[in-house]
Image: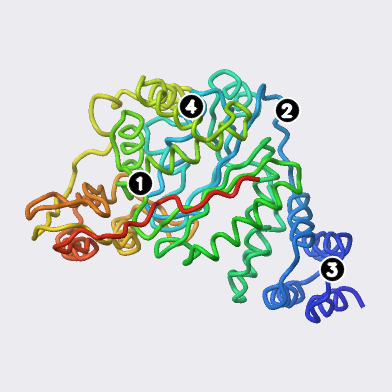
């Protein structure tokens, strides 16, 4: 009896047909399969797994459960970039204008963040006047004109994924590679881009804790993309330390300006150049990633990447008068935290710093939480840097009237300083899976 026989099929470890997976997802989305039945099937998948074809079939069924964006009105090749999330991850704000300056079309629909800071939309809204809502015509015209637009997600992309994710979160079935891969890729494929580059993170500050599990997830997502006819590449990056030098919303806008101006942290720049190079390669604009890195570095050196960022912000109503003049983040209720001894930073606890940033108001635990766009942490040192007593480690930006003194020791403890320089240093880019 349907759907019990379908649940039993997976419970017993049997391979499930594409048509039956499609029917199950359709029936669940339409309310003909109830939550406890869907939860039972999710647990069966968690325990028994899915093969590559089944995972692709689940992804396609979830993609087709809602709107599928048609980007054919955009001239040229569109490339989407997705990160599995981490701490101080400012990559999108930097890589999007850089690749747009190089000729890639970036038509991005983003959401709001849950976690230590806001998402890309929250960060952009810290720029006075910036609009996250554009009509379809405005969106397409802007991408055709300047190569880049970022808006809030409209319509209903992959509603089946939204329903299933809520169940997975409540039933202990989140950490399943087929379920994670199909969740991410159903939304990416519904977004309509011609090619996809994935930044898959691992480590203490990421969802996937080990490089091996991150590789498994990346491989599954690349296989799904390729099976769907989309060139897909995954870049594996370490989150065993904060990626960038800022944890906060306006602070990450300031960091984007810094990197596009030729400054900024080494780790973030390395990920930007790697992800961006593969975006250029996916678009067919370069033959190799090395050629792509060279082009992107040129756009930093000559200022055209920063100019594209300004053009993008202004196109959506943002006031860019601060760029090149002063930081967007005003120094209000700011506390400088300094090193107390000489040595080398051997570890930075990104999760601890992220929790502090969230406590200042920079992030949200629930989707309805109101966040403070101008609080958080600006780091002045990163992992493996040499420091001397008195060097500035971090500036904490608290909310108006907030007592920031309680955070000082917690921030200092997050920076582990030892006398000797570490002999082994983890590379921030661990691997590439190029589909």
Label 3 near label 2: C-beta < 8 Å? Answer: no
Q: For this view, does 176 lie left or right of residue 349? A: right
Q: What residue is drawn where x is 47% and y is 52%? A: 113
Q: CA distance from mark 3 to mark 1?
A: 43 Å
Q: CA distance from mark 2 to mark 4?
A: 22 Å
Mark linked to residue 16: 3
Q: Which residue is mark 2?
A: 72
Q: Which residue is mark 1?
A: 267
- Nearer the observer, disc 2 or disc 1? 1
Label 3 near label 4: C-beta < 8 Å? Answer: no
Q: For this view, does 418 lie left or right of residue 222? A: left
Q: Which residue is mark 4?
A: 316
Q: Indicate the position of residue 94 as horizontal and vertical percent values.
A: 42, 35
Label 1 near label 3: C-beta < 8 Å? Answer: no
- Nearer the observer, disc 2 or disc 3? 3
Judged from the image, the secondary structure of the residue bearing numbered disc 2 is loop
89 to 142, vertically: above or below: below
Label 1 near label 2: C-beta < 8 Å? Answer: no
Q: What residue is drawn where x is 56% and y is 40%? A: 152
Q: Indicate the position of residue 33 as horizontal and vertical percent values.
A: 81, 69
Task: Please identify the quarter of the rendering in which residue 279 is found.
Answer: top right
Q: Mark 2 or mark 4: which comes first in sequence?
A: 2
Q: Indicate the position of residue 372 as horizontal and vertical percent values.
A: 34, 49
1 to 296, vertically: above or below: below
């Amino acid at each position: 009896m349907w759907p019990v026989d379908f649940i039993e099929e997976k419970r017993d470890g049997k391979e499930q047909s594409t048509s039956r997976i499609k029917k199950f997802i359709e029936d669940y989305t339409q309310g003909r399969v109830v939550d406890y039945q869907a939860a039972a099937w999710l647990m069966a998948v968690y325990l028994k797994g899915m093969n590559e074809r089944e995972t692709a079939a689940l992804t396609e069924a979830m993609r087709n459960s809602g709107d599928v964006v048609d980007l054919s009105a955009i001239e040229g090749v569109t490339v989407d970039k997705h990160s599995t999330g981490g701490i101080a991850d400012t990559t999108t704000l930097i890589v999007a204008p850089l690749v747009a300056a190089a000729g890639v079309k970036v038509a991005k629909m983003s959401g709001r963040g849950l976690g230590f800071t806001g998402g890309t939309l929250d960060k952009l809204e810290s720029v006075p006047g910036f609009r996250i809502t554009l009509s379809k015509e405005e969106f397409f015209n802007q991408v055709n004109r300047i190569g880049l637009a970022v808006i809030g997600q409209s319509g209903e992309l992959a509603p089946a994924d939204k329903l299933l994710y809520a169940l997975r979160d409540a039933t202990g079935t989140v950490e399943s590679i087929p379920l994670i891969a199909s969740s991410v890729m159903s939304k990416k494929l519904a977004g309509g881009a011609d090619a996809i580059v994935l930044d898959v993170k691992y480590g203490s500050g990421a969802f996937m804790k080990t490089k091996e599990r991150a590789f498994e997830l990346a491989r599954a997502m690349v296989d799904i993309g390729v099976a769907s006819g989309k060139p897909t590449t995954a870049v594996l990056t370490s989150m065993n330390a904060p990626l960038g030098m800022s944890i906060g919303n306006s602070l990450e806008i300031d960091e984007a300006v810094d990197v596009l101006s030729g400054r900024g942290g080494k780790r973030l720049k390395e990920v930007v150049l790697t992800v961006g190079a593969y975006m250029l390669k996916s678009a067919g604009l370069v033959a190799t990633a090395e050629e792509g890195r060279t082009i992107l570095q040129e756009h930093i050196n000559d200022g055209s990447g920063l100019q594209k960022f300004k053009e993008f912000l202004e196109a959506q109503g943002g006031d860019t008068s601060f760029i090149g003049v002063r930081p967007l983040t005003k120094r209000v209720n700011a506390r400088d935290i300094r090193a107390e001894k000489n040595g080398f930073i051997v570890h930075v606890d990104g999760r601890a710093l992220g929790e502090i940033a969230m406590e200042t108001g920079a992030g949200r635990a629930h989707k309805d939480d109101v966040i403070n766009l101008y609080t958080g942490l600006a780091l002045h040192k990163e992992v493996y840097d040499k420091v001397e007593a008195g060097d500035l480690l971090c500036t904490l930006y608290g909310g108006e009237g907030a007592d920031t003194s309680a955070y000082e020791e917690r921030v200092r403890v997050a920076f582990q300083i030892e006398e000797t320089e570490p002999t082994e240093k983890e590379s921030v880019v661990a691997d590439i899976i190029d589909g």
